[in-house]
Amino acid sequence: MIRVVVADDQELIRTGLTAIIDAEPDLTVVGEAEDGAEAARLAIVAAADVVLMDIEMPGTTGIEGIALLRAERPGPRVLLLTMFDLEEYVFEGLKAGASGFLLKTSPTADMLDAIRAVHQGRQVLAPSVIARLVTSFVQRTPAGSRDRADAAEVLRDVTERELAVIRALTRGMSNAEIAAHLHLSEATVKTYVTRILAKLGLRDRVQLVILAYELGLAPQR
């Protein structure tokens, strides 16, 4: 059972998130908090595995709450939630040690999958968040910065269908959007992404999208 603390200064949102999480057979909410400090305290006391943490809260913010958990070894993983994918939030959150970053507008299924993923030690970023990180990167690195021979070598084992998935990822598409675009199931898209990461020796989608820009696979902006 994955033990979760929900932190948000709005009671209605906390109640809704708690109900959704508690409805899952492998998840349980062990505490609710109104700010980052309370979230950190509850997470430690209740031995939480994951903290679902809003960024903007009165008093102690979500990012400050992560700092309070740094001394815990091992400590709970933190999945940040926000209404806005502002670049400063993304970089501050990841620098502080967040394991994931989702928008509050993300589908419920994505949020539940993200909780499970960060519990397993994986990093989770919303597609629009990936797009912001990549935008920051490509401002310094021009698309197609690697030569054609290098690109051909890197992509030698990648199929045409996998290339189509990569191009869709560079547009900031979610799994559901890629599935609709390529007429596939979401499960198949997830399989493709996992296979692509393994073939290219990459850790996550951020690395994949950045590589795609270097290889000239992304659409010109």
Image (cartoon, rainbow, N blue to C red):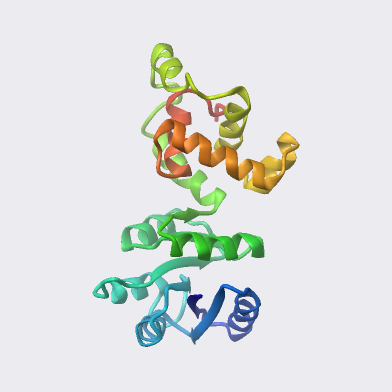
Along the viewing direction, whichever of 198 and 65 lies nearer the viewer: 198
In the rendered image, residue 108, in percent from the top left (x then y), is placed at 65, 65
- Whether residue 45 appears in this view of the structure is yes
Q: Please determine whether, in this image, residue 147 is positioned above or below residue 97.
A: above
In the rendered image, residue 174, in percent from the top left (x then y), is placed at 62, 47
Q: Quadrant of the C terminus?
A: top right
Q: Please determine whether, in this image, residue 34 is positioned above or below residue 180.
A: below
Q: Residue furthest left?
A: 71
User: Which of the 4 quarters of the picture holds residue 161?
Assistant: top right
User: Which of the 4 quarters of the picture holds residue 165?
Assistant: top right
Along the viewing direction, whichever of 144 and 209 lies nearer the viewer: 209
User: Which of the 4 quarters of the picture holds residue 220?
Assistant: top right
- Whether residue 172 appears in this view of the structure is no
Q: Is residue 67 left or right of residue 29?
A: left
State the residue at coordinates (43%, 18%). 151
State the residue at coordinates (65%, 81%). 19
State the residue at coordinates (52%, 79%). 8
Q: Is residue 26 left or right of residue 62?
A: right
Q: Please determine whether, in this image, residue 122 is positioned above or below residue 104.
A: above
Q: Please determine whether, in this image, residue 39 is positioned above or below residue 136.
A: below
Q: How many labels, in total?
A: 0
Along the viewing direction, whichever of 157 and 71 lies nearer the viewer: 157
In the rendered image, residue 209, in percent from the top left (x then y), is placed at 48, 36
In the rendered image, residue 97, in percent from the top left (x then y), is placed at 33, 62
State the residue at coordinates (38%, 30%). 141
